Amino acid sequence: MRKTLETNTLGALRVACAFVPLLRKSKAPRVINVSSGGGQLTGGADGWSPAYCISKTAVNSVTLQLATALPKFAVNSVCPGWVRTDMGGQDASRSVEEGADTIVWLAADASQKITGKFLRDRKEIPW
């Protein structure tokens, strides 16, 4: 469990904090955390390991905390869905492009007013 939390939660927090000084120079600073449906408090487990689900729920909490602490930033979590990657496997229902779409949209095109949200397919989903 410790390794999963170190990677999925503390890793995301450390990367965000390391980049804050550089991002402050941007006119539209953004932090996008990759989460999972397994991190949802509303029925998100779906067979994932407890360590994975807990780490992704914690990353969602990090997102909310950073969104409050960095009011000039857009800080959001994204659920890419079940994606055909090494982790998701070839039976996964979504392509890499589909999984990355909301992440790229938030990074490049979405309104800066969208912050402190959990999104999938460019729409807010329940925490």
Image (cartoon, rainbow, N blue to C red):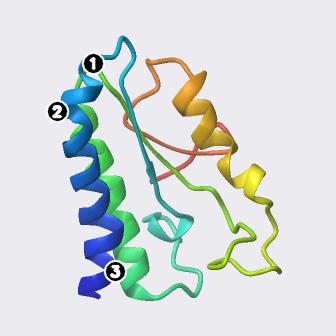
Q: Nearer the viewer, mark 3 or mark 2?
A: 3
Q: Residues within 10 Å of mark 3 (few under 14, many from 20)?
A: some
Which badge, 3 or 2, comes first in the chain's sequence? 3
Q: Quadrant of residue 72?
A: top left
> Pointer 2 and pointer 1: residues touching (CB < 8 Å)?
no
* Element marked by disc 2: helix
* Residue under label 2: 69
Task: Please state which amino acid type lies under the numbered disc 3.
Answer: Thr
Crowd rating for badge 2 (residues with CA inside 10 Å; few <14, some 14–19, many 20+): few
Looking at the image, residue 120 lies above or below residue 51 = above
Residue 70 x, y percent position in the rendering:
21, 28
Q: Name the residue located 32 percent from the left edge and 72 percent from the top edge.
A: 7
Gap in angstroms between the C-alphas marked 2 and 1: 9 Å
Q: Are marks 3 and 2 in contact (CB under 8 Å)?
A: no
What amino acid type is highlighted by mark number 1?
Lys
The foreground one among 90 and 45 is: 90
Rendered view: 99 above or below 23: below
Residue at x-position 57% and y-position 87%: 47
Secondary structure type for disc 3: helix
Q: Determine the residue positioned at 80% across, 60% down.
A: 95
Q: Which disc, if any, is residue 4?
A: 3
Identify which residue, 19 or 73, lies in the foreground. Answer: 19
Q: Could you tell which of marks 3 and 1 lies nearer the N-terminus?
A: 3
Residue type at tag 2: Ala
Q: What residue sits 55% from the left and 32% below the top?
A: 106
Neighbourhood count class around disc 1 (C-alpha, 10 Å): few under 14, some 14–19, many 20 upward: some
- Residue of label 1: 72
Horizontal and vertical percent position of residue 96:
74, 58
The N terminus: image quadrant: bottom left
Q: Residue furthest front?
A: 22
Q: Position of residue 5 (x, y in %)?
A: 28, 75
